[in-house]
């Protein structure tokens, strides 16, 4: 079974440039997450989708970050314009749990997209 | 106040010893608790979860939960160099979204 696929794995851009990350979750997983992970820190949630609906985007900096999950499968996370402080690893994860449902908490993570902003 | 607190370490133990990793959380309404392992440069992977007070054992790993003290721990018996990684504690919160601690780095020396 294919895991969570992310691209690109690495991206280097100049500040103020736009960047986009793509994620393909595990087949059948209705819940998709974007996390940000800085060096030496744990993953921090940016946005959570259940199918097409963003059910938790309270930590997404909406002035420069946007996300979409069309058709409830693949998702794209965009940053425009990028700032130096956006340099981090952007992790996509998926699970088969639903809001309010007791769950195993087993999120399956992709390899991540490492962003460097110069 | 951060919702999930962990000592960043590193925690150094010799091979064969017991490694004890600790985590505290602030939300008394949390119901599910998880330990993820993250090797350097890799993504996190789930190793254990626990819902009820007490101990839960899985092979060399034991998770312990004390909801009254808002405390979760992970014990690794017979530590191996391959256990060297960062261990992330995670707690379910709003909408069952996991909140992660910053992780504890474990170093197991041969």
Image (cartoon, rainbow, N blue to C red):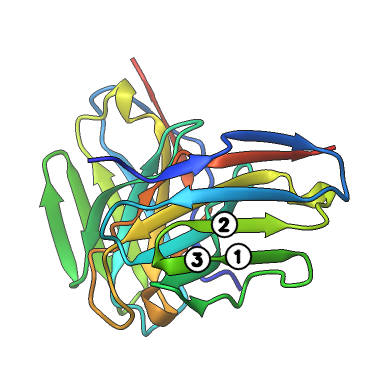
**Quadrant containing the C terminus of chain A in the rendered view:** top right
Residue at the disc numbered 2: A76
Q: Chain of mark 2?
A: A
Is the residue under label 2 in contact with that under label 1 (CB below 8 Å)? yes
Q: CA distance from mark 2 to mark 3?
A: 7 Å
Q: Is residue B100 visible?
A: no
Where residue B67 appears, as percent x and y from the top left, is: 29, 76
**In which chain is the residue bearing label 1?**
A
Q: Which residue is mark 1?
A: A67
In this rendering, does residue A81 appear at all?
A: yes
Q: Which mark is residue A69?
A: 3
Give percent across and percent down for residue A21: 60, 48
Q: Which mark is residue A79?
A: none
- The chain identifier of the residue carrying mark 3 reads A
Rounded to the nearest angstrom, the CA distance separating label 1 from label 3 is 7 Å
User: Is residue A25 rendered to the left or right of residue A67?
Assistant: left
Is residue B53 shown left or right of residue B36? left
Q: Earlier in the sequence, mark 1 or mark 2?
A: 1
């Amino acid at each position: 079974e294919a895991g969570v696929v992310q691209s690109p794995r690495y991206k280097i851009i100049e500040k103020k440039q736009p960047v986009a990350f793509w994620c393909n979750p595990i087949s059948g997983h209705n819940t998709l997450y974007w996390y940000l992970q800085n060096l030496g820190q744990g993953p921090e949630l940016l946005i959570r989708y259940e199918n097409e609906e963003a059910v938790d985007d309270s930590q997404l900096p909406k002035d420069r970050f946007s996300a979409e999950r069309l058709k409830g499968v693949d998702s794209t996370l965009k940053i425009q314009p990028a700032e130096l402080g956006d340099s981090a690893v952007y992790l996509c994860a998926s699970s088969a749990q639903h809001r309010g449902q007791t769950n195993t908490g087993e999120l399956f993570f992709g390899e991540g997209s490492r962003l460097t902003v110069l | 106040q951060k919702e999930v607190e962990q000592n960043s370490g590193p925690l150094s133990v010799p091979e064969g010893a017991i490694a004890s990793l600790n985590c505290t959380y602030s939300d008394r309404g949390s119901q599910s608790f998880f330990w993820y392992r993250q090797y350097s440069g890799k993504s996190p992977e789930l190793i254990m979860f626990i819902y009820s007070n007490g101990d839960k054992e899985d092979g060399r790993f034991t998770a312990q939960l004390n909801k009254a003290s808002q405390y979760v721990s992970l014990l690794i018996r017979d530590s191996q160099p391959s256990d060297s990684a960062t261990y992330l504690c995670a707690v379910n919160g709003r909408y069952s979204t996991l909140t992660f601690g910053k992780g504890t780095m474990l170093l197991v020396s041969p």
